[in-house]
Image (tube, rainbow, N blue to C red):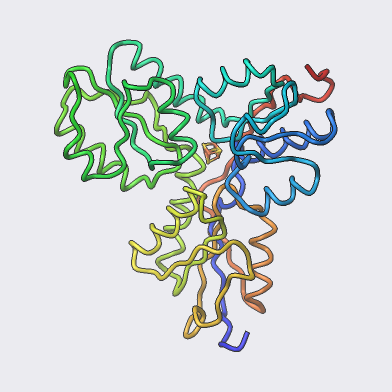
Amino acid sequence: MSSPVPHTVLLAAPRSFCAGVERAIEIVEHALAQRGRPVYVRKQIVHNAHVVADLEARGAVFVDELDEVPTGATVVFSAHGVSPAVRSAAGRRALRVIDATCPLVTKVHAEARRFTARGSTVLLIGHAGHEEVDGTLGEAPGRMILVPDVAAARTVEVPDPERVAYLTQTTLAVDETSEIVDVLRARFPALRGPASDDICYATTNRQQALSAVAGEADLVLVVGSANSSNSVRLVEIARRGGTPAYLIEDAGDIRPEWLAGVTTVGLTAGASAPPRLVEEVVTALGPVTVLERETATESIRFTLPAAVRPGSRPR
Ligand code: SF4
């Protein structure tokens, strides 16, 4: 690079893969090993272009909808989850389904069913068009309303203000979401919420870790794909804190002009971005001093579904 290189890289920790992403990737790998290629996957298994390209090269076939999957074939549902309508469609097509929905997304679906079964309207805080949001809204069409931002929270109307609950997408910014919940609570004092936060541990941890390095950095780089919600939130959080920040798919996206006058780079990666991409960014920035700032340790692992556990027989 022609511009002066930075002297220090502050690595946020935790960063990169979460337990739900690791499980989803392992599910496709096991399915390929046990059933052979092709294994169909509905939507991107996780929102990362490198992960998708790698699995594609090994025999996964990514499709947008189930009608692209041959009758009777194996199909994996992505980590973001699906609506009951998609599950029914898979049953009608006699597809052999392996579900890679993150258990923390499944929890939000269960909450949606619980609240709406009691007659509550559920206000789902999340981003329109995101696959996770589409899947969750599909649990109770007509009884859930999407609330994308504070402006919508100020105007949304419900049939019965005494019976209203909120849930959230798992990968939102913690600070923005609590602002939206505050607005909803002020308008609907009877508002119920989830027993524990829907924003998942991995999203929360990555945001806190980034905040710990962004204040000391001249520039923040976030490794992740543009359709990765939690990665985009990391960029926004750094910028809201006053530090220039960019989302990069990999080291090849770094522009020399971003580094002009920069001595310290804060570096992190969204929950769907492979760790090796972070290492490649450090190499591309080098030679640099690398300091890791760890704000939490993560030991969560999710078990694989029975359909792909080692020793199981394909169904
Ligand atoms: S970001 Fe959170 S909800 Fe999404 S896959 Fe990872 S652990 Fe699950």
Compared to 88, does 100 lie above or below? below
Indicate left or right for 172 with 304 as reference.
left
The part of the image, by quadrant, that contains residue 115 is: top left
User: Considering depth in this image, is 61 or 232 the residue closer to the camera?
Assistant: 61
Quadrant in the picture for the N terminus: bottom right
Q: Is residue 9 left or right of residue 156?
A: right
Q: In the picture, residue 155 is in which quadrant?
A: top left
Residue 141 in picture, x, y percent from top left: 37, 22
- Residue 82 is situated, as x and y percent measured from the top left of the image, at 53, 28
Q: Residue at x 62, y 64 (%)?
A: 250
Residue 200, image x, y percentages: 47, 37
| Quarter of the image with the C terminus in it | top right
Q: Position of residue 234 (x, y in %)?
A: 45, 55
In-image side of 65 versus 117 (left or right):
right
Is 35 left, or right, of 207 in this rendering? right
* Tally of marks: 0
Residue at left 38%, top 42%?
127
Which quarter holds ligand 1? top right
Residue name at image x 39 percent, y 20 percent: 140
Whether residue 31 is situated above or below residue 173 in the rendered picture: above
* Residue extending furthest toward the top: 118
